[in-house]
């Protein structure tokens, strides 16, 4: 089985390819910058993007959007995570919560799949954790907010310190892709 993935993010492509391979689903990358509407709802953003991608390529396609929701910041940066990362980065997030004792956060992923203008379905995955007090890259580097996110089930390591294999066992993206993979394979 083959599925098209509209994304310009090579890291997301690596993760999706490895995770969906478990379900014998081959991911074909479509390098497409999908416009994102301004919304506080990741599902709404993902549905808009996948509908755009479907209209562009005229083939069944999925997109993935994710956000880091920090409790003490009322869910910020949430659906604006990409923009916030590009503007203030991990250092900026750490400065915002430096004096806060509550560092709880949720990393959320939404997969939106479209096979016609009338059929869009979403799959949500999330991982609870905390924000570290410093950037912890380990030997694997990590990307995005991975160097500051400590998943509760991650043995006190950030996503970045885990590396791809370990991260893919517990990540928010793994959980949404797993739900999608099970659904897609069972059709």
Image: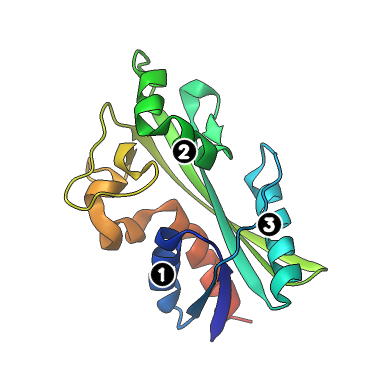
- Nearer to me, 170 or 112: 112
Residue density around tag 2, few if under 14, some if 14–19, many if 20 or more, within 10 Å: few
Give the vertical position of 147 relative to 25 (above or below).
above
Helix, strand or loop at mark 3: helix
Residue pointed to by mark 2: 86
Q: Residue 49's mark?
A: 3
Q: Residue furthest left?
A: 139
Residue 46: x, y in percent? 65, 54
Give the vertical position of 178 relative to 60 (above or below).
above
Mark 1 or 2, nearer chain start: 1
Residue at horizontal 34 percent and vertical 44 percent from the top = 146
Residue density around tag 3, few if under 14, some if 14–19, many if 20 or more, within 10 Å: many
Cα separation between marks 1 and 3: 22 Å
Helix, strand or loop at mark 2: helix
Which of discs 2 and 3 lies nearer the camera? The answer is 2
Residue 67: x, y in percent? 52, 43
Residue pointed to by mark 1: 19
Residue 68: x, y in percent? 48, 39
């Amino acid at each position: 089985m083959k599925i098209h993935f509209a994304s310009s993010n090579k890291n997301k492509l690596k993760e999706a390819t490895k995770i969906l391979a478990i379900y014998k689903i081959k991911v074909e990358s479509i390098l497409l910058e999908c416009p994102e509407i301004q919304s506080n709802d990741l599902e709404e953003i993902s549905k808009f993007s996948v509908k755009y991608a479907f209209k562009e390529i005229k083939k069944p396609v999925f997109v993935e959007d994710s956000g880091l929701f920090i409790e003490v910041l009322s869910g910020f940066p949430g659906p604006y995570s990409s923009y916030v990362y590009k503007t203030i980065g991990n250092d900026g997030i750490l400065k915002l919560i430096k004096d806060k004792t509550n560092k709880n956060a949720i990393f959320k992923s939404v997969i939106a799949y479209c096979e016609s203008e009338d059929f869009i379905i979403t799959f949500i995955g999330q991982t609870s954790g905390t924000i570290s007090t410093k950037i912890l890259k380990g030997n694997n580097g990590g990307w995005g907010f991975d160097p500051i996110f400590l998943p509760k089930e991650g043995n006190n390591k950030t996503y970045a310190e885990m590396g791809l294999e370990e991260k893919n066992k517990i990540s928010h993206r793994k959980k949404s892709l797993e739900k999608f993979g099970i659904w897609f394979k069972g059709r």
